Amino acid sequence: MLSLLLPAMLAVQAMALMEVYVPEMPVVALHGGDVTLNCSFSVATPFNLSDLTVFWRLTDTKRSVHGYREGHDQLVDQAESFANRTSLFPASWAWATLRSCLAGWWWLDEGSYTCFVRVQDYGSAALLLQVAASYSKPVVTLEPESNLRPGDAVALTCVAYGGYPQADVIWQDGGGRNLTDNITTSLVANEKGLFSMTSVLTVVLEPNSTYSCRLINPLLGEEGYASVTITGQNIAFPPVALWVTIGLAVCLLVLLIALAAVCRRKIKESCEEARREAEEAKMLEEEESKTAMTLLKS
């Protein structure tokens, strides 16, 4: 019955005088939770519930979400994916507001929903439904974690689970400089359509550096934050440079020892030569003294 009524309502919709209102901003539903879609309308004269016809449908695929006619729910044409998940609230109709509650929402339910209303006249309006789920607190890891050397390329990985939709990822260094242009981000969906996000930032290693990863859920406005600091304790002295340094130190020590030995020998030789010269001068002086005494005696 409802499938026969829809074309008739659509055919005369252009002549409708009824104003139908839905939220202008997208309606955000939490994954796995309930959401209420509001549809309000205005009529010129009072009406009975038996005169009211209402149905919700997906705007793009035209699948029926929920129907109401002559005081009763009309679910014969309801899409299977919405079975046992929808309800209307008659108590709200006294204020000419229809509240459609839909339970257990997940990402496949995203899209545009149209509310059609008929009393004396016809009217319709569409709203946008978006589904969101919170991500876990992000965790940042360092690869490799040991034997790091200054100048090495290091991969920093930021991981968060169970969220929807794709989050915005912002990487920064300790000075607040944005490093997001250097990242690679991947998404993996589980059987429920929730994402595991992995973002990898590659940097050239510097000691005592801090890097932070921030995830922002664009629908919920939630932020997750994690950081890692690379200190001097994480950085190993380069093995090659260590051996070079040891070799240079040994060579320098040997050179100093050799230099000390040469200097000692030179000093010793100089001292011996000075002693010989002193002895020769003394002997020459004694001989000259003897010669002078001999001449005087003569």
Image: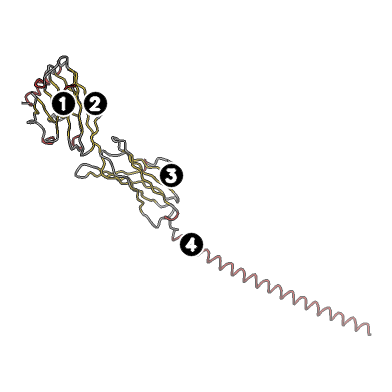
| Residue at 67% from the left image edge and 71% from the top image edge | 266
Q: Position of residue 16 (x, y in %)?
A: 15, 16
Number of other residues with Cα within 10 Å of mark 2, as a class: few under 14, some 14 to 19, many 20 or more: some
Give whichever of discs 2 and 4 has the lower sequence position.
2
- Marking on residue 174: 3
| Marks 3 and 2 in Cβ contact (< 8 Å) | no
At a point 17% along the width and 33% down the height, the residue shown is: 102
| N-terminal-most mark, 4 or 1 | 1
Q: Earlier in the sequence, mark 2 or mark 1?
A: 2
- Where does label 4 land, which residue? 244
Label 4 environment density (alpha carbons within 10 Å; few <14, some 14–19, many ≥20): few
Alpha-carbon span between mark 3 and mark 2 = 42 Å
Q: Is residue 118 above or below residue 101?
A: above
Q: What amino acid type is highlighted by mark number 4? A: Val
In the image, residue 77 above or below residue 172? above
- Residue behind mark 1: 91
Report crowding for label 1: few under 14, some 14 to 19, many 20 or more residues within 10 A (C-alpha).
few
Dot 3 amino acid type:
Gly
Q: Is residue 13 above or below residue 77?
A: above
Distance (Cα) linking label 4 and label 3: 33 Å
Is residue 245 positioned above or below 175 on the image?
below
Which element type, helix, strand or loop, lies under badge 1?
helix
**Is there a contact, CB below 8 Å, between mark 2 and mark 4?**
no
